[in-house]
Amino acid sequence: MIADPHGNLYGTTYASVFEVRNNSVKVLHNFTGTPDGTDCQASLHRDAAGNLYGTTLFGGLFNAGTVFKIDTAGNETVLYSFTGGADGGHPSGSLIEDVAGNTVPLEMVVPMPKERFSSWIPTATKPFFTALLAVRTGSPPSRD
């Protein structure tokens, strides 16, 4: 679970994202599998604006997991639906924020080939993501 500056807590279950405020639990989103994903195993990430980000292990358009956002009004948006192919799949790790303020995947179950690093996420969503190894070392991950 994570907390906001006011002491409210946010967490996930297998199929939902919830908020604990004033000893009361409110479900912010129930996952359906397709297209929004299912099986949240990692903790959430909260950005400075209060939006929540997370991953699902399964579901999405190709049943290979998703990266999602829940805005401050409680609206859920799938930011990326993994194919399970060259882009990897079944993300089981948490998300973090890089030095530029972008939300990035902490780890992926399927490593990406170095030559596909720059194309693993469609252009429209690239501002949201980069690979953790690129943030840490300045170079794309390899299969080694």
Image (cartoon, rainbow, N blue to C red):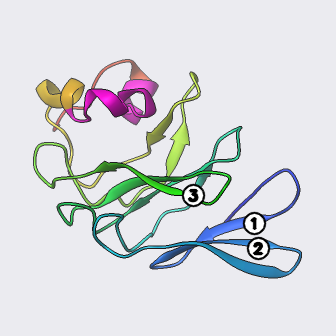
Find disc 2 in the rendering and name its residue: 20
The x, y position of residue 77, in whole percent, is 45, 53
Decide: few, some or many residues near mark 3? Use Cα within 10 Å; few <14, some 14-19, many ≥20.
many
**Is residue 70 shown left or right of residue 93?**
right
Q: Residue at x 36, y 64 (%)?
A: 36
Q: Are marks 1 and 3 in contact (CB under 8 Å)?
A: no
Name the residue type under label 1: Leu
| Contact (Cβ within 8 Å) of mark 1 with mark 2 | yes
The answer to if 21 sits in the magenta stretch is: no
Which amino acid type is marked by label 3?
Leu
In what element is the residue under mark 2? Answer: strand
Quarter of the image for residue 31 reads: bottom left
Give the distance between the C-alpha atoms of the residues marked 1 and 2, in whole angstroms. 5 Å
**SS state under label 3:** loop
In which image quadrant can residue 89 be found?
A: bottom left
Mark 1 or mark 2, earlier in chain: 1
Q: How many marks?
A: 3
The span picked out in magenta is: 120-135
Give yes or no for residue 134 being in the magenta stretch.
Answer: yes
The disc placed on residue 9 is 1
Marks 1 and 3, how far apart in space? 11 Å
Q: Is residue 6 above or below residue 99?
A: below
Where residue 21 sits in the image (x, y, percent)? 82, 71
In this view, the residue in front, 62 or 115, is 62
Q: Residue at x 45, y 38 (%)?
A: 104
Which amino acid, mark 2?
Answer: Val
Residue underneath mark 3: 44
